[in-house]
Structures are given as C-alpha cells and as structure tokens.
Image (cartoon, helix red, strand yellow):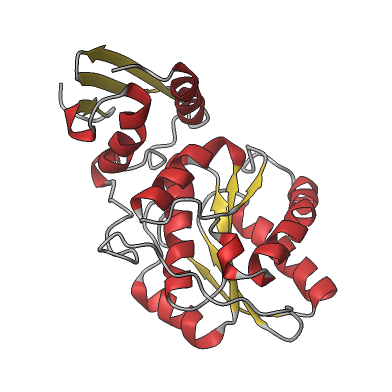
Amino acid sequence: MFDSIIDPTVGAPGNDRGRTALAGRPAQLNGLRLGLLVNTKRNAADFLEEVAAALESEYGVTTVLTRTKPSIVHPAPPEMLEEFRGETDVVVVGVGDCGSCSASAVADGLQLEAAGIPAAVICSDAFRVSADAMANLQGTPGYEYVTTAHPVASLSREGVRERAVAALPEIVGMLTRPAAAVAS
Amino acid sequence: MTIDQAQLEQLKQTLQADDYRLDVDVQGDSADVAIVAGPDACEECLVPKPLMQSMLAPVLGVQPDSIRLTYPTDKA
C-alpha cells in the first residue's frame, strides 16, 4: 500500500503555488445548501452527520449532497468537486484524523475555496503539522481549519456527537466570517 | 544547521499518532531520515515524500532535496 501513495498536491488549486483566493462568505447560513465531503477514516462520516444535523436544527441549512472520497490520500476528484460547485453553497470537509488525510483535507478545502465554495475543514489536533505543511505547499500559509482532539476514530457515537457539537461554533464562524479572516 | 528540537519532537508526536517512528541523522548540510512503521501503523496515513521533506527541512535546518528519506516499504 505504501507503494501506492499519491501526492495529494497534484491537481490541487494554484498549481503555480500562488495563494488560493478564498471564497466569499455568506452573512448567515439560514436557507443555504450544505455539502459534506467525507473521507474513509473511521467515524468521519458519523462526525460530519452530527455536524450536519446540528447545522440543520440550529442554523437552518439543508444537507443536499454527501460524497465520500475514494481514498484518504487523494483530494476529491474533479467530478466530485463539480457536484459540490453545482449543488451546494457551503461544504464541511473531514475528518483529517491522520497524517495524509489531514493534508488532503486541507487540499480539498483549498480546492473548494478556489471553486468559490466556502469550506470548513476539520482535522484532529495531532495532525496540525501535516495540515499546515499542505497549506504552505499550496501557497496558502495560515489557512485555517477546525481542530478537534485526537483521536476521532476510537470514539463512540455519543463521543462523536459531543465533539461535533463542540466544534460547531468554530465551523459556523469559518463558513460565515469574512474570507480574509479565514486565511490569516 | 541547527535542529529545532521542539519542532522535531512535535513532528515525532505527529507520526507517533499514526504509529510511526522517526529516526534522524543529520550530517552537515544533509540528513538521513527513516520512518519506521509500528504494528498498528495505518498504511495510507503517511504523507507523500515531497510533503514530508518539506516538513522536515525547516526542522532539521537542511534543504528538502538534501534529505534522504526512507519509508517503510522502500527497498533496502
């Protein structure tokens, strides 16, 4: 499997390594269409489901599209990105709960931003190093993402729910505050 | 060439979270780095070598292309 490691920087935005222009943010989430970009790490889907449920009940979004990436290493393929571009207003990405998947989650967030879609990327705090390294490599140092404590994979569903609820204010802030503040 | 020990420790902890060990040997302006998998290592969790080298370079105080990086499945 190690032989099949693929560089997730390939095909990501800003191939000239210029800073990715982040998407404009809505003032509020009410009435917007939510997309979920899930990786295959254990509990990632549950985490984003809990986030979506809370965003629906507390902020009035509608979850319209959920897509699971084919692997934790790759960024989302172009056709998946197209779906998000066509069908969603904001996207939550996660969960970066390992070295390669935190890096590719940041690459996904930057791809979505480049496509004009505000994104909130969730990574576990043990993998800030690889997430930040990807942001730097993509020419966008300081790109912000939401962190939750490591590990996520071993949590019970109730534990996942608690984490998702705890992360909610930061996720909402990332999706609604001015883009300049998201890439400090 | 000065190793940033605090950042090196942080990087080791990051790898350890995926059950990898980082062995580093810096000689002058180059470095040999081996990443060793533990029994619970997640096979797909290592970042690609170019990204790992870009992470290691400022920590070790050497250029990325001066880091000889060995991953668990590299041929001996």
Q: Who is closer to the viewer here, A15 or B49?
A: A15
Q: Who is closer to the viewer here, A74 or B1?
A: B1
Residue A1 position within the rendered picture, expressed as x and y whole percent measured from the top left = 30, 42
Q: Please, is residue A127 above or below residue A44 in the view?
A: above
Q: Is residue A93 visible?
A: no
Q: Please, is residue A59 above or below residue A106 in the view?
A: below
Q: Please, is residue B72 above or below residue A64 in the view?
A: above
Please tell me which residue is depicted at 42% across the width and 54% down the height of the picture: A104
Q: How many marks?
A: 0
Please tell me which residue is depicted at 23% across the width and 28% down the height of the picture: B69
Please tell me which residue is depicted at 49% across the width and 63% down the height of the picture: A109
Q: Who is closer to the viewer here, B7 or A45?
A: B7
Residue A141 position within the rendered picture, expressed as x and y whole percent measured from the top left = 44, 51
Residue A83 position within the rendered picture, expressed as x and y whole percent measured from the top left = 46, 82
Left or right position of B14 against A27? left
Instruction: Identify the image quadrant of the C terminus of chain B.
Output: top left
Question: Which residue is the extreme one toward the right?
Answer: A58
Q: Is residue A130 visible?
A: yes
Left or right position of A77 against A116? left
Residue A146 position within the rendered picture, expressed as x and y whole percent measured from the top left = 63, 53
Instruction: Identify the image quadrant of the N terminus of chain B.
Output: top left
Left or right position of A160 against B19? right
